[in-house]
Image (cartoon, helix red, strand yellow):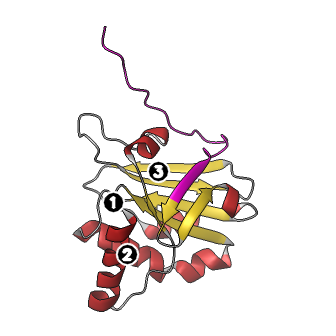
Amino acid sequence: MEQQKCLCMPLLGDSFPELYVNTTHGPMNIPGDLKGSWFVLFSHPADFTPVCTTEFVGFQKRIADFDALGCKLIGMSIDQVFSHIKWVQWIKETLGVEITYPIVAGTETLAQKLGMLHPEKGSNTVRAVFVGDPEGKVRLVLYYPQEIGRNIDEVVRAV
């Protein structure tokens, strides 16, 4: 009998799963290191791709709005920290925008824990947005297919 993979995901009101991750800003515990702040963890399928780059720049351009709401931003993909660092450098050199929030080097296990893997698409992740409150509770979950970019105004409004 074939064993089925668990398609788990945090639901509204759940405690955000404890994640110990590597980021472009060093090791991080999510949500532990964010206690007392709202946070937005958003994922993208891959570094150096057009839609993902546009979204990362879009989040950075709205960072003052998130700061004013007491909300921290964290990006994530299954790419490694080295790739994230090179991508951030490319964005700064090419587009003149400095990405100041950390980017998590996710894993397939992490993506499964958050319910972010596209069924039948291997390790490709959905575009997910998780909004957590100062106590680490999940307050909003948005999932988009890889082909559709996010509306940053809507994320700011929701926070």
Q: In what element is the residue under mark 2?
A: helix
Task: Name the quadrant containing residue 10.
Answer: top right
**Mark 1 to mark 2: distance in Å?**
10 Å
Q: Which residues are magenta?
A: 1-21
Q: Callout 1: few (<14), some (14-19), or many (20+) C-alpha neighbours within 10 Å?
A: some
Q: Callout 2: few (<14), some (14-19), or many (20+) C-alpha neighbours within 10 Å?
A: some
Task: Name the quadrant containing residue 11.
Answer: top right
Q: How many marks?
A: 3
Q: Is 156 positioned to the left or the right of 132 in the image?
A: left
Residue at the spot 29% in from the left edge and 35% down from the top edge: 119
Q: Looking at the picture, how far across and down is residue 124, in whole percent?
A: 28, 47
> Which amino acid type is marked by label 3?
Leu
Q: Is 69 positioned to the left or the right of 148 in the image?
A: right
> Are the residues at dot 3 and dot 2 in contact (C-beta closer than 8 Å)?
no
Give the position of the C terminus as an image quadrant: bottom right
Q: In what element is the residue under mark 1?
A: loop
Q: Looking at the picture, how far across and down is residue 49, in whole percent?
A: 23, 67
Instruction: State the residue position of label 1.
Output: 79
Instruction: State the residue position of label 2.
Output: 85
* Residue toward you, 83 or 10: 83
Observer able to see residue 157: yes
